[in-house]
Image: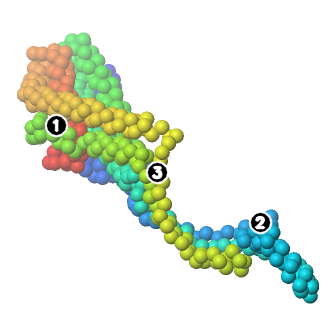
C-alpha cells in the first residue's frame, strides 16, 4: 500500500518534470516582435522575389528614357553582284538621236565623199567600246546611319509613362507582399505566445490537481474522505495531464511554423500579447487606409498605365516625323563609289491613312481599361472601409472582454483557494475543488484568447492602414 502511495506521488510530479526540457529548448533564442519583423524582411524569399521584380521594373522604366535619343548605327556591307553595274554610251541621249538623225547621216556621207581619207579614221572611231562599268562586281561600303524620331503622335511619351507606372505597380506589389508577411508574422508569432501561455496554464492546472490528488490520498488514508472522492481527484488529474500534453503538442506545432517562417530554430517570442492600447478614431483609421494602403497606390499605377495606353492608341491617328542622316566611311574605287556623296541628312514624314491594326477598337479598349480601374478603386475603397471598421470593432470587443474578465479571474483564483482549504477540512468535495480550478483555468485561457484576438485585430488594422512599422509603439 505504501509503495502504491509513493508511485502515485511520483506520477503526480512526472508531468512537471517532463516539461522542463521543452521549456529549455524553446528558450534557446528569445526574440522580440520588432527583431522578428526585421529578420523576416531579410530572410523571406517571397519578399526578395517581389523586391527583385520591383528593381527590374525600375530598370525597364529607366531604359525607356532612351526613346528620346537618336539611334546611331555603324553599318558595313559586302555585296556580290551577278554582273557589275554598267552603262552603254550609245544608250545615253543625245547619242542615239544623233546616230539615227537622217540629216546628220547625209552630212557625214557627203563629207566622206569629199574627203575619202577620213574613212579609215571613222572606222577606228566605230571600234572604240562605248560600254563602261560603273561598279565592281563585289561592292564594299561602310558608314554611320542615324535616325531620330522627332514626333510620334505622343506614343513615345506614352510608352515611357506606362513603363514608370509599371515600375510603381511592382513597388506596390512589393509593399502588399510586405504587409502580408507582417500579418502572417503577427499571427504566427503571437500564436506561439498564446500557445506558451495556454501550455503554462494547463501545466499549472495539472500541478495543482496533482497536489490536490496527494491531499486526497492522505485524507483517504486517514478515513476522512471516501474512495470515490480520491478517484474523482485522480480522474481530474489524469484529464489535466492529457490537456497539458495536448497544449504542449500545439505549442510544438506553432513553434515549428514560426521557426520555418524566420528560418531559425527554437525561436522564443519575448514580446507579450497586447493588453493595453489607445487607438486613433475610426474615421482617422479609415482615412489612413484610403491614403496609405498600397492597394490604392497600385490602382493609381494601373490608372496611369491605362491613360498611357489610351494616349498611345490616339497616336495611331497622328503622323510620325523623323530626321535621318548617313556618313560614308568607306567606298570602293568604282565610278559610283567615287561619285557617291560623303554624307546626307533629311527629314521624313509618315501619315497613317488606312491602318489594319483595328485602332478604333484598340482606342475603345484603352478607354474601357480606365473605366475598369475606376470601378475597382470604388470597390477597394468600400472593402477597406469595411475591413477597418470590422477590425476596429473586433479589437474593441476583445479589449472589453479582456478587461471585464479581470474581476472574474480574481474571483476564480480566490474561489479555488477557498475550496482547497474547505476540502482539507472536510467541508467541500473533491469535485468542488476540481470545478474551481478548471473554472480558473478556463477564465485564464479565455482572457489569453481575448488578448490574442486584440493583438491580431491591431495587426490587421495596421496592415489595412499600411503602417506595419507602427506596431512597435503598442509593445511598450
**Which residue is identified by label 1?**
286
The image shows residue 199, relative to residue 355, as above or below, that is above
Quarter-of-image position of residue 245 = top left
Q: Nearest the camera: 161 or 388? A: 161
Residue drawn at the location 36% of the way across and 46% of the way down: 311
State if disc 2 and disc 3 touch (CB < 8 Å): no
SS assignment at label 1:
helix
Report the mark closest to the observer, 1 or 2. 2
Labels 3 and 2: the sequence-earlier one: 2
The picture places residue 246, in percent across and down from the top left corner, at 34, 28
352, 464: nearer the viewer? 352
Q: How many marks?
A: 3
Quick one: label 3 or label 1, which is nearer the N terminus? Answer: 1
Q: Which residue is drawn at 22% across and 14% down?
A: 229
Q: Name the residue under label 2.
A: 81
- Report if the CB atoms under discs 3 and 1 are less than 8 Å apart: no
Of tags 3 and 1, the one toward the viewer is: 3
Viewer-side residue, 175 vs 378: 378
Q: Can residue 16 be seen in this view?
A: no
> Residue 11: x and y, percent?
33, 28
Cα distance, mark 3 to mark 2? Answer: 35 Å
Q: How far apart are marks 3 and 1 (CA)?
A: 51 Å
Instruction: Classify 10 Å Cα crowding around label 1: few (below 14), some (14-19), many (20 and above).
Output: many
Q: Is mark 2 on a helix, strand or loop?
A: loop
Question: Is 52 rendered above or below residue 136?
Answer: above
Q: Which residue is drawn at 21% across and 12% down?
A: 226
SS assignment at label 3: loop
Residue highlighted by disc 3:
351
Q: How far apart are marks 1 and 2 (CA)?
A: 76 Å
Dot 2: few (<14), some (14–19), or many (≥20) neighbours within 10 Å?
few
- Colour scheme in use: rainbow
Amino acid at each position: 500500500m505504501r509503495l502504491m502511495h509513493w508511485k502515485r506521488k511520483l506520477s503526480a510530479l512526472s508531468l512537471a518534470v517532463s516539461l522542463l526540457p521543452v521549456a529549455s529548448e524553446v528558450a534557446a533564442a528569445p526574440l522580440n516582435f520588432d527583431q522578428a519583423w526585421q529578420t523576416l524582411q531579410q530572410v523571406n524569399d517571397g519578399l526578395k522575389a517581389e523586391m527583385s521584380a520591383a528593381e527590374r521594373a525600375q530598370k525597364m522604366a529607366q531604359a525607356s528614357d532612351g526613346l528620346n535619343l537618336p539611334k546611331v548605327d555603324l553599318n558595313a556591307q559586302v555585296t556580290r553582284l551577278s554582273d557589275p553595274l554598267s552603262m552603254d554610251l550609245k544608250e545615253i541621249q543625245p547619242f542615239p538621236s544623233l546616230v539615227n538623225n537622217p540629216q546628220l547621216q547625209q552630212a557625214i556621207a557627203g563629207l566622206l565623199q569629199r574627203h575619202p581619207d577620213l574613212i579609215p579614221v571613222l572606222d577606228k572611231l566605230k571600234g572604240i567600246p562605248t560600254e563602261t562599268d560603273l561598279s565592281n562586281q563585289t561592292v564594299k561600303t561602310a558608314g554611320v546611319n542615324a535616325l531620330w524620331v522627332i514626333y510620334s503622335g505622343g506614343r513615345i511619351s506614352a510608352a515611357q509613362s506606362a513603363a514608370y507606372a509599371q515600375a510603381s505597380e511592382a513597388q506596390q506589389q512589393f509593399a502588399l507582399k510586405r504587409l502580408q508577411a507582417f500579418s502572417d508574422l503577427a499571427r504566427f508569432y503571437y500564436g506561439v505566445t498564446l500557445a506558451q501561455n495556454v501550455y503554462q496554464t494547463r501545466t499549472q492546472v495539472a500541478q495543482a490537481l496533482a497536489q490536490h490528488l496527494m491531499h486526497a490520498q492522505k485524507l483517504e488514508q486517514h478515513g476522512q474522505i471516501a474512495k470515490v472522492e480520491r478517484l474523482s481527484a485522480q480522474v481530474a488529474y489524469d484529464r489535466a495531464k492529457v490537456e497539458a500534453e495536448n497544449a504542449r503538442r500545439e505549442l510544438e506545432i506553432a513553434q515549428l511554423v514560426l521557426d520555418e517562417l524566420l528560418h531559425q530554430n527554437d525561436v522564443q517570442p519575448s514580446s507579450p500579447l497586447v493588453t493595453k492600447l489607445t487607438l486613433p478614431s475610426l474615421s482617422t483609421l479609415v482615412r489612413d487606409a484610403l491614403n496609405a494602403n498600397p492597394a490604392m497606390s497600385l490602382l493609381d499605377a494601373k490608372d496611369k498605365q491605362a491613360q498611357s495606353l489610351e494616349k498611345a492608341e490616339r497616336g495611331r491617328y497622328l503622323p510620325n516625323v523623323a530626321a535621318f542622316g548617313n556618313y560614308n566611311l568607306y567606298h570602293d574605287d568604282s565610278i559610283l563609289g567615287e561619285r557617291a556623296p560623303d554624307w546626307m541628312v533629311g527629314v521624313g514624314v509618315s501619315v497613317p491613312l488606312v491602318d489594319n491594326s483595328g485602332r478604333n477598337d484598340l482606342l475603345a479598349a484603352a478607354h474601357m481599361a480606365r473605366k475598369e480601374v475606376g470601378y475597382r478603386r470604388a470597390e477597394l475603397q468600400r472593402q477597406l472601409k469595411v475591413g477597418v471598421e470590422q477590425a476596429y470593432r473586433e479589437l474593441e470587443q476583445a479589449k472589453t472582454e479582456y478587461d471585464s474578465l479581470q474581476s472574474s479571474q480574481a474571483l476564480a483564483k480566490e474561489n479555488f483557494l477557498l475550496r482547497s482549504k474547505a476540502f482539507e477540512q472536510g467541508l467541500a468535495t473533491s469535485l468542488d475543488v476540481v470545478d474551481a480550478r478548471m473554472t480558473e483555468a478556463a477564465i485564464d485561457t479565455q482572457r489569453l484568447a481575448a488578448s490574442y484576438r486584440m493583438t491580431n485585430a491591431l495587426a490587421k488594422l495596421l496592415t489595412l492602414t499600411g503602417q506595419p512599422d507602427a506596431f512597435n509603439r503598442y509593445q511598450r
